[in-house]
């Protein structure tokens, strides 16, 4: 049920969620309550102690509310509405990172994949991981051990079946029950319960040997050996077994950082850090409570324990919610999973607890995460200071928290490419990098810059996405004018500059004289890093394309032409069309090409041409 009112006395004394709105019907704040009437009436006192609440109520005009059956349902609905609407006066988790996850799909015969998109699609997700290389290594090790399929379409046994990397469920070579038992073992392994997987495999090996099924016993023995190797490579051990998330926060009144360490079976599996918006005036327990509700509201893996520096309100309610989330989401038989024989399914196994340790290893672990939060906060402060300076120097409307920079790379107009790199809060965001093959005939640097900018920002506008705070183009006044024309033609209003490398000149719209920033300025250092990264990324892409062309050239068919001579010819002429149009005398001018070989090259190319 949902309704709109302006008087709290009209609210029911039932659990639910309330949405405080302004006169334009914009949501100012979302909250949950055990009793809607009692909770919302507290906002209408004559004297409000909290300054943030006083400002909120100055803008209040009316409210919507939704009644739920239980307080737990209200908690879940509250976190979902905050993530959807991002109300101005709520504490908001700024979770725009795209870390990799391992995904076990919800198909009849699931696959194990790396993904950066977490969806409510019935799949099981593990992560996030901060290092995609380690995730790929883990995937490479697990697939041969548990033999989960790779193919998108199950259309017959493939090469993986022939080399014993897949049991070929597509052709009925393995039963669904046996395949899902392997899937369950992968889930246990990714949850940090490797010892249970090892114990299950040992039992299966012993049973196979007792049944004189020695071929199966050998396969399981090899699985055990491989898993031992995987576990050795993952070791970063404490002296005891832990399966926890450790969460701490740091707040300097302007920036709020939350850090999460993931610890599974005594191993530190990774670290994440997040910015919280609208939380500067809130206490650590309030920040941590808001973070936990939003962080675990999606299909994110929930640990057995969450260690905190201070206890939060609603502890019992949140523990019950997270425990039910594990039981319902991870081990509900209705989702197609199967029980693994020999594994205890005691409901208490899935009870989640929130704790504040006061001594020993766990206390030191919380202190370490708190220290990490302070260090990351200092990094953000330094970056924020530099970005504030940049905003002042460049006279742009917003702090350039997101910067997109472009560079062009080509060889005498041939094989032209462009790069776009993205910096967020002063750091590279490589997931958002893009590279472009350009169609503009060269050499035409202005035309190429126009093409890449039009392709990027027309797509952004068509999708209704928010433009960056600052666009940086490599070059001087000419490149800047091209960027201004493109953005104006699309109706996109944002900061834009040109950065010339030779004298580190910054070209600004409507200012005739280029700006020279102090050489020791952190703002200049950010611009230099952005520009240099765009250049590196463009040159790398151009080199890869050039190398690919070199590897597949008609010159390879000519006797006497090896890689070195081929490179000399291509460098001399620039492109293959010029080689075909060259005379024998012109080919002879290439380093390492004598006249007889030049004649052979000419004859071969003209024969092929004819």
Image (cartoon, rainbow, N blue to C red):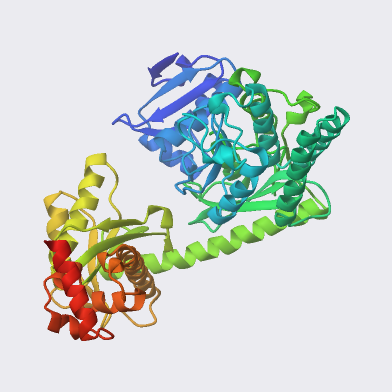
x and y, in percent, of residue 431 in the image: 42, 53
x and y, in percent, of residue 398 in the image: 30, 57
For the C terminus, the image quarter is: bottom left
Q: Is residue 369 visible?
A: yes
Q: Height in image: 102 above or below 124?
A: below
Q: Is residue 277 left or right of residue 393?
A: right
Q: Which residue appears at 62% of the width and 60% of the height?
A: 372
x and y, in percent, of residue 456 in the image: 24, 52
Q: Is residue 312 visible?
A: no
Foreground residue among 180 and 284? 180
Q: Height in image: 557 above or below 202?
A: below
x and y, in percent, of residue 492 in the image: 19, 50
Q: Which residue appears at 42% of the width and 41% of the height?
A: 55
Q: Height in image: 122 above or below 428?
A: above
For the N terminus, the image quarter is: top left
Q: Is residue 117 left or right of residue 600?
A: right
Which image quarter: residue 25?
top left
Q: Which residue appears at 57% of the width and 31% of the height?
A: 168
Foreground residue among 320 and 170? 170
């Amino acid at each position: 049920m949902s309704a709109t009112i302006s008087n709290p006395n009209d609210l029911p004394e039932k659990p639910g969620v309330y949405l405080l709105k302004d006169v334009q019907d914009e949501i100012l704040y979302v909250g949950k309550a055990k009793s809607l009437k009692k909770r919302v009436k507290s906002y209408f006192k004559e004297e409000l102690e909290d300054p943030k609440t006083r400002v909120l109520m100055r803008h209040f005009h009316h409210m919507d509310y939704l009644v739920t059956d239980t307080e737990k349902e209200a908690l879940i609905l509250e976190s979902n509405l905050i993530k959807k609407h991002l109300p101005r006066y709520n504490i908001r988790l700024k979770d725009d990172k795209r870390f990799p996850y391992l995904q076990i799909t919800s198909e009849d015969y699931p696959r194990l994949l790396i993904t950066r998109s977490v969806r409510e699609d019935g799949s099981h997700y593990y992560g996030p991981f901060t290092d995609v290389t380690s995730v790929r290594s883990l995937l490479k090790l697990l697939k041969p051990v548990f033999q989960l399929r790779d193919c998108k379409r199950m259309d017959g046994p493939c090469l993986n079946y022939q080399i014993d990397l897949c049991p070929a469920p597509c052709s009925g070579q393995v039963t669904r029950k046996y395949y899902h038992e392997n899937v369950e073992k992968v889930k246990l392994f990714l949850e940090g319960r490797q010892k249970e997987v090892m114990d299950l495999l040992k039992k299966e090996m012993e049973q196979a040997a007792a049944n004189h099924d020695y071929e199966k016993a050998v396969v399981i023995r090899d699985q055990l050996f491989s898993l031992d190797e995987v576990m050795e490579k993952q070791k970063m051990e404490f002296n005891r077994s832990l399966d926890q998330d450790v969460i701490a926060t740091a707040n300097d009144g302007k920036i709020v950082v939350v850090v999460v360490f993931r610890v599974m079976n005594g191993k530190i599996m990774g670290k994440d850090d997040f910015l919280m918006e609208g939380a500067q005036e809130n206490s650590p327990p309030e920040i941590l409570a808001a973070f936990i509700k939003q962080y675990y509201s999606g299909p994110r893996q929930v640990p057995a324990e969450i260690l905190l520096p201070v206890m939060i309100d609603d502890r019992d309610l949140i523990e019950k919610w997270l425990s039910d989330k594990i039981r319902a989401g991870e081990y509900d038989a209705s989702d197609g999973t199967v029980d693994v024989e020999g594994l205890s399914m005691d409901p208490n196994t899935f009870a989640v607890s929130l704790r504040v340790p006061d001594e020993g290893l766990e206390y030191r672990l919380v202190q370490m995460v708190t220290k990490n939060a302070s260090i990351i906060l200092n990094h953000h402060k330094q970056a924020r200071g530099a970005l504030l300076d940049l905003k002042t120097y460049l006279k742009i409307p917003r702090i350039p928290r997101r910067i997109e920079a472009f560079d062009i790379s080509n060889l005498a107009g041939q094989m032209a490419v462009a790069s776009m790199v993205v910096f967020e809060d002063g750091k590279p965001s490589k997931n958002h990098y893009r590279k472009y093959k350009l169609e503009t005939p060269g050499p035409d640097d202005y035309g190429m810059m126009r093409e890449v900018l039009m392709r990027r920002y027309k797509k952004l506008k068509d999708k209704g996405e928010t433009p960056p705070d600052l666009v940086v183009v490599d070059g001087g006044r000419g490149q800047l004018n091209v960027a201004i024309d493109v953005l104006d033609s699309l109706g996109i209003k944002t900061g834009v500059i040109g950065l010339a490398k030779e004298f580190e000149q910054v070209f600004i719209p409507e200012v005739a004289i280029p700006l020279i920033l102090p050489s020791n300025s952190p703002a200049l250092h950010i611009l230099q890093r952005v520009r240099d990264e765009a250049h590196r990324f463009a040159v790398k892409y151009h080199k890869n394309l050039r190398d690919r062309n070199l590897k597949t050239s008609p010159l390879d068919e000519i006797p006497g032409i090896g890689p070195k001579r081929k490179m000399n010819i291509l460098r001399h002429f620039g492109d293959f069309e010029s080689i075909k149009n060259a005379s024998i005398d012109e080919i002879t001018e290439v380093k390492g090409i004598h006249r007889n070989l030049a004649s052979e090259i000419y004859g071969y190319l003209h024969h092929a041409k004819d």
